[in-house]
Amino acid sequence: MSVTVDQSYAYCIRVARTRARNFYYSFLLLSREQKRAMCAIYAFMRFCDDLSDEEGATEAGIQQWRGELDDALEGRFSENPVWPAFHDAVNRYAIPHRYFREIIDGVSSDLQPQRLETFDQLYRYCYQVASVVGLTVIHIFGFESPRAVELAEKCGIAFQLTNILRDVREDADRSRVYIPREDLVRFGVDLSNLQHNEAFVRLMRFEAERARRYYAESFPLVDLVAKRSRPSLWALMQIYSRLLDRIEQANYRVLERRIGLPLWEKLMIAGRALAYR
């Protein structure tokens, strides 16, 4: 493997800077070592997502990536430049290996059309693709209280529920329906014939309120991570909860356009986070 650890970190930072629309601005508030580690972990996550999202994605491709992960955790690297930095970050912060395998399990489920029946099934999916991300990064943030683990799980649920509300149209076009069928039936919404009507708004409001509860329950996590990391986590939670605000303020018109935060607002949040110590 000709890529050095520093070259690998530089590559991961480029991936995060160009692909992490929300996460990257919180990374800027961390120490250099923490920022590099966050970018390495993000680059791994990005590759995981791409394996299930890109055209022509196959189970064989995911299994190959799973094998590369197992090798990388042991210090054996394929030609993918992410691995040396990833291996260094995982070892430096003693991140449990099982989290990365659970992430791959989660994204592999997206290879087939998704039809979730209950919120319990949705929670499990959110845990695999988002909560384990939170459980990973709190090791980089630093924590001592066991309660941080519980709250990091809830924080991931809040983030992923927000993503699902934002991406309803895009996911439906890919035959992925993450909103549980029990909720669709309750509010009389047929996602095979998407329309922005009263029933759709009621459904979205119900799901948004569910996400709000997870934000409220997880916010004490900010005070449970190491003091130097609190501005970064605070900014990240503010960016995502503000995204949910925007979805609500747009009266859930996610079928017409992709709702997001402008760059100036993310930078403003990052600036305000400096006072959170």
Image: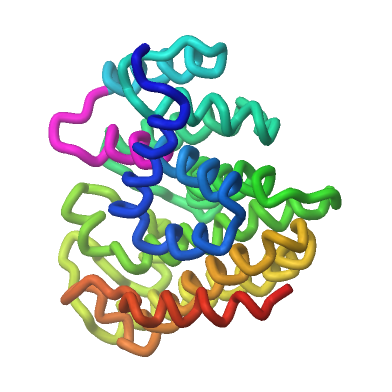
At x 38% / y 61%, what residue is drawn?
164
> As drawn, is 37 to the left or to the right of 56?
right
The region drawn magenta spans 45-58
| Identity of the residue furthest to the right in this view | 145
Q: Is residue 119 above or below residue 53?
A: below
Residue 239 % position (x, y): 48, 72
Q: Is residue 148 above or below residue 70?
A: below
The correct choice, above or below, for 246 with respect to 9 in the image is below
| Colouring scheme, one of rainbow, by chain, secondary structure, one colour | rainbow
Q: Quadrant of residue 266?
A: bottom left
User: Is any part of residue 116 visible from this angle?
Assistant: yes
Report the magenta stretch's main SS: helix
Q: Residue at x 30, y 52 (%)?
A: 19
Instruction: Give the quarter of the figure containing the C terminus.
Output: bottom right
Q: Is residue 71 magenta?
A: no
Residue 196 coordinates in the image, percent (x, y):
22, 80
Left or right: residue 220 versus residue 3 is right
Query: Camera-side residue: 241 or 89?
Result: 89
Residue at 55%, 57% in the rendered image: 157
Percent position (x, y) of residue 22? 41, 63
* x and y percentages locating residue 30 in the rendered image: 59, 57
* Along the line of sight, the residue nearer the viewer: 61 or 24: 24
Q: Is residue 181 left or right of residue 50?
A: right
Q: Quadrant of the N terminus?
A: top left
